[in-house]
Image: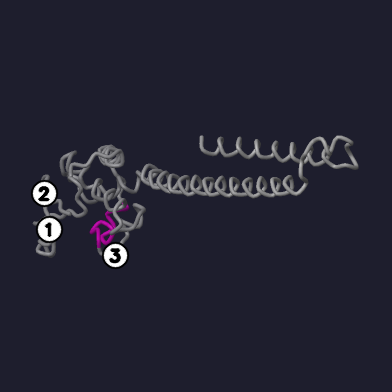
Amino acid sequence: MKTRVIRITSIILIIILMVMINSIIFSNPVLSPTAQAAGIDTKDVVTGLATAFILYLLFESVDNDYTDEIKIDQTELNNQEEIEIRVNSINIDLLARAIYAEARGESFQGQIAVGAVIVNRMKSNQFPNTIKEVLYQYNQFRSIDNGQINNTPNQIAYQAAQRAVDGEDPSQGALFFFNPDKSENPDAFNKYEVTVIIGNHVFAK
């Protein structure tokens, strides 16, 4: 709306310029015998032209600034859309493999929770922003080290992966999970806040 008003004002100024130029032509004694009767001072007309031109430039400057603001806002919007696209186009197969390797034998909710932890890490600025980088970050997931990630997941793991990507989060925002009975150093998680315990896994953030 603001841009439209500015452009309309600019058009009006251009029309004024044309009228004033026309006045100069008809107020010129050489071009018009009625110049004396018109009572128009050429110096005043030139001053008016200059003023109108300066105003026109100012309005164009404001218009350009407003356009730049729109471009900035659009850039921010595009960045936000890219984040959403990155989350939604996550590699379901790789996530399902991780869930199957880390949580097979757990309840369906427990498997979704493990997938949610991986998705939460991807969204967090504390971890990489792709599922592959999250999983292959050094010394983070046992299934990467022991090769279990390469096993073919079952349909339950795929369903759990999809539910986690869709935003379901039984882990309650957790960024970590561990099995106290299998963890080599469970005390390392004491510094984190436990969010929930599901089956054999403790979830924390």
Q: Disc 1 vs disc 3: Cβ atoms closer than 8 Å? A: no
SS at circle 2: loop
The percent position of residue 165, horizontal first and vertical second, equals 31, 41
Residue nearer the viewer, 129 or 136: 129
As measured in the structure, the alpha-carbon distance from the residue carrying label 1 to the one carrying label 2 is 9 Å
Question: Can you tell which quarter of the image residue 59 is in?
Answer: top right
Q: Which amino acid does label 3 sit on?
A: Tyr
87 vs 37, left or right, is left
Residue at 9% from the left image edge and 57% from the top image edge: 180
The residue shown at (90%, 42%) is 30
Residue designated by label 1:
182
Q: Residue 138 carries which label?
A: 3
Q: How far apart are marks 1 and 3 (CA)?
A: 19 Å
- Crowdedness near tag 2: few (<14), some (14–19) or many (≥20) residues, C-alpha within 10 Å: some
**What amino acid type should be assigned to the residue bearing mark 1?**
Lys
Magenta region, main secondary structure: helix
Residue bearing mark 2:
200
Q: Estimate how packed mark 1 is, as few (under 14), some (14 to 19) or many (20 or more) residues with alpha carbons within 10 Å.
A: few
Depth order, front residue of 43/144? 43
Disc 1 to disc 2: CB gap under 8 Å: yes
Whether residue 45 is situated above or below residue 137 in the rendered picture: above
Residue 19, located in which quarter of the rendered image?
top right
Q: Where is residue 61 in the image (x, y as percent from the top left)?
A: 58, 49
Q: Sequence order check: which comes first, mark 3 or mark 2? A: 3
Report if residue 149 lies within the magenta region: yes
Q: Which colour scheme is used?
A: one colour
N-terminal of the pair, mark 1 or mark 2, is: 1
Residue range (magenta): 140-150
Quadrant where the image shows the C terminus: bottom left
